[in-house]
Amino acid sequence: KAGVTQTPRYLIKTRGQQVTLSCSPISGHRSVSWYQQTPGQGLQFLFEYFSETQRNKGNFPGRFSGRQFSNSRSEMNVSTLELGDSALYLCASSFRDAGELFFGEGSRLTVL
Amino acid sequence: GQNIDQPTEMTATEGAIVQINCTYQTSGFNGLFWYQQHAGEAPTFLSYNVLDGLEEKGRFSSFLSRSKGYSYLLLKELQMKDSASYLCAVRSSNTGKLIFGQGTTLQVKP
C-alpha cells in the first residue's frame, strides 16, 4: 500500500511569488491535514480537509489556502511568499475521523 | 486554546530507560498521540491514548492521566536508532484539531 505522496519534495521561490504543493493520501483515506514545520515553531497546524470540505483551519494568514478534490488528493497554495514561509510543509492522511495521522515526506520550501 | 509542553532535549545511555513527559491544556480532549521523527524524515506514529492508563507496545509504552493533563512516553532498552525527536500531540474534542508540542530531541549515547 503506497504511503502519503507529496510533490514537489524541494523547491526554491523568491519573495512575492506563489507556490502550490500537492498531496496524495493513502488509498481509502478521506481526511487530509497540512502542517508547517520550522525549527523554531515545531509543527504548526494549517488546515484539515474531509470529503472536499475544510473542517479546521489554523492561525495562518489568508495567503495560505487549500482544497481537496473528489479523489481525496489535496493541494495547498501560498501566495505572496515571504522569507518566513521557508519551512517543511507536511501533509498527513487519516482513515477514520480523529484517527492517527500518516505523514508524507514533506515539501521543503525555501524562499529567497 | 491548546497548550502542550514537553522538554526540549534529553540524553540517555544505550540500554537504559527514558521517560519523556508531556503536559497539556486543551478545550475538550479527544486523544493523545506520540510520534517519532528522525532528522530529515516524516513523523511516524508510535502510540495513542484516549483513556487513562498505560498502553504498551514492545519497547515503547505511553501513559495518560486526563485529570492531570499529563502523559509520558517510556522507552526501554534504548538503542542508538532511538535518537530522534518525540512529538506529543493532543486532539481537541471541541475543535477537532490535532495540535503538536514542540517535540523532545532524544540523544542516545553509547
Image (cartoon, grey):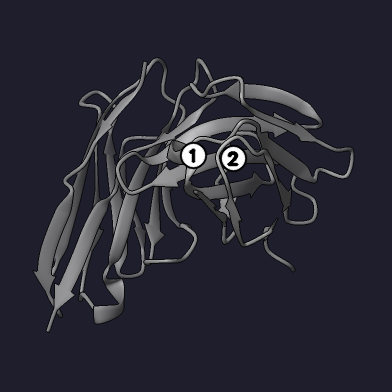
Give coordinates of residue A70: x percent, y percent: 89, 38
Give coordinates of residue B105: x percent, y percent: 23, 58
Query: Label 1 amino acid?
Result: Asp
Could you classify mark 2 by the number of other residues whose Cα lies within 10 Å: few (under 14), some (14-19), or many (20 or more)?
Answer: many
Q: Which quadrant would the N terminus of chain A be assigned to in this image?
A: bottom right
Query: Label 2 amino acid?
Result: Trp
Q: Mark 2 — residue?
A: A34
Give coordinates of residue B88: x percent, y percent: 34, 44
Rendered residue at 31%/55% (across/down): B86
* Depicted B57 relative to depicted A96: above or below: below
Mark 1 element type: helix
Could you classify mark 1 by the number of other residues whose Cα lies within 10 Å: few (under 14), some (14-19), or many (20 or more)?
Answer: some
Closer to the camera, A33 or A78? A78
Q: Mark 1 — residue?
A: A85
Image marks 1 and 2: residues in contact by CB distance under 8 Å: no
Mark 2 element type: strand
Tell me the chain of label 1. Answer: A
Rendered residue at 37%/15% (across/down): B1
Give a yes or no on whether discs 1 and 2 share a subunit: yes
Give coordinates of residue A2: x percent, y percent: 73, 67
Rendered residue at 49%/48% (across/down): A112
Q: Which label's residue is closer to the chain start, 1 or 2?
A: 2
Rendered residue at 35%/22% (across/down): B2
Tell me the chain of label 2. Answer: A
